[in-house]
Image (spheres, rainbow, N blue to C red):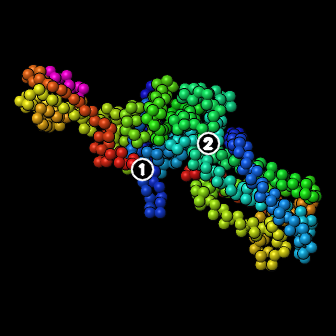
Amino acid sequence: MSALRETRIVFNRAMRLSLRNPAWVIIGLTQPVLYLALFGPLLRKMTQVPGFPPGTWWQVFVPGLLIQLGLFGALFVGFGLIAEWRSGVIEQMRVTPASRTALLVGRVLRDVVVLVVQAAVLVLVAVIFGMRVPVGGVLLAFILVALLGAACSSASYAVALITKSEDALAPLLNTIAVPVMLLSGIMLPMSLAPHWLRTVSEINPFSHIVDGIRALFRGHFSSADSMWGIAVAAIIVLLGITFGARTFQRESA
Amino acid sequence: MTENVISARGLARTYKTRKGPVEAVRGVDLEIREREIVGFLGPNGAGKTTTLRMLTTLIAPTAGEATVAGCDLRKDPVGVRRRIGYVAQGGSSAPEATIGEELVDHGMLYGMSRADATASGKRLIEQLDLNGLWDRQTKALSGGQRRRLDVAMGLVHGARMIFLDEPTTGLDPQARANLWEHIARLRDQLDSTVFITTHYLEEADALCDRILIIDNGEIVAAGTPEELKRRVSGDVVTLTVAHEGQAADAAAVAKGLSSDGEPEITGVTVRFRVTSGAEVLPRLLRELDGVGVSLAGVEVHRPTLDDVFLTLTGRTLREEAA
């Protein structure tokens, strides 16, 4: 199918250009590693606090960092797209007969690959520090992170293509990302939250993905939490890709 | 062969804005034949780029019909895309990518194999004087080189109908003249049809077989550069006679040939307009000789497209471009 071939061409090109400047991939990774090293130790004693979820602090904290990595890493890919749009690359691709969805998905797949590599490095560092989690749980968690990342990067591209302005994109993304992050219990589990805050966080789909990954890290593959996480991630990725693809198909894009 | 590569009827595009609809293009009719270089000339905001973007399927017309390279613009935009090459106004390459990568990726998005795209790309960089730059990152290219890369990208899949949107904007005169040569070669050597938008009159004059002038979203004139110049104001012939006494005799002869009323006498000079200076000149000289007027000089001023544009729109293009 030609759309698959076109997706591969766009993916290869995007990957090649990313690897030419691996500094950004590394910079994107330093933040979660810093959190792991500098913030994580504060949580060690938190496990004794009543209401702290089951499992070691690693199993609670590292899933949060994975989501943070996925959320922030992928939400900000739109900036790169604005640069591409400004240099005429987007239009140059749009005059070819290539499928518009392929132009989006090729880029999203690149972001997903970068993200999963970053997630793997993060988990590896945590393991070196002493984390012990089931391998199956980690692999499933990577799939969730990949889905989340695909949704966020697709949405980010769509918003970038609509606004076409870094000045508009930055505050817009922060307005979305910060409350979503706070309400998903990334830093501290929402089980510590007062009732009202917990209710609000349950509306936030990302909190279910965090809970899902935490369950997977404990090895509870078929628990309600992990099922919810997988279901929510699947829905989010569908919504994100649909939004992105529709925007890429619009002529003004 | 004089088949139409583009024919458009009533092509129009209205934008919805908060202040109400804006008619960017109000019904353009076009006929472009094979192997023609057609210039689309107009000030900024006249509708040039909107028309070009409609013809290249980047935006859909809000009214009208068009066939481009044998495909219906509305029913088969993908077919149109396959058969046309497009060189955008603002460049088309990523700064980090190399010339080779850009050409091959672009060719492959047109369905070419990697080998075919590479062969075609290498041939083009040679034709466009970019030899040895295959592995150079595009950010390291000069403005003229980058523009030629844009042209190469528009040609890589072998389209015979090429659209160029203000290809020489921002280039120095030497790079511009060089690009003109390459564009002329597209037609002369590759039998391509070229549609080029510009707001440089000298560019349209130097390069194009035919010019369409667009203003306020409508085509206000069409023809060869020569036809347009002739139609608008004619050539101005200025005679300088040897003695002031002969000026009246010269004027009498001139009046018989003038396309625009009474010749104007100032001292030893007589100025008058004719439709075509080149055609009138031999007869003028013969007749002046016949009545015994001796000339100190004769000058024919061909109107420029500047004059044409001024006459048609009441404005000069340069004011608009500034």
> Would you say residue B188 is visible in this rendering?
yes
Q: In this view, does A226 lie above or below B298?
A: below
The span picked out in magenta is B277-286
Three-letter amino acid code of the residue under disc 2? Pro
Picture coordinates of residue B293 (x, y %)? 10, 24
Query: Quarter of the image holding residue A28?
Result: bottom right
Q: Earlier in the sequence, mark 1 or mark 2?
A: 1
Q: Could you tell me which quadrant the N terminus of chain A lies in?
A: top right
Q: Residue at x 71, y 66 (%)?
A: A178
Amino acid under label 1? Gly
Q: Mark 1 points at which residue?
A: B45
**How far apart are the alpha carbons under marks 1 and 2?**
28 Å
Residue position marked by numbered label 2 in the rendering: B95
Is residue B60 placed above or below B114 in the rendered structure? Answer: below
At horizontal 30% and vertical 44% (from top left) the residue drawn is: B310
Q: Is residue B27 visible?
A: no
Pick the residue in front: B220 or B43.
B43
Q: Is mark 1 on a helix, strand or loop?
A: loop
Q: Position of residue B261 (x, y in %)?
A: 14, 37
Determine the residue located farthest toward the front in the rendered image.
A38
Say the numbered circle drawn on residue B155.
none
Q: Is residue B285 magenta?
A: yes
Q: Residues within 10 Å of mark 1 (few under 14, many from 20)?
A: some
Q: Where is residue B319 in the image (x, y as percent from the top left)?
A: 35, 48
Tell me which chain the residue with mark 2 is part of: B
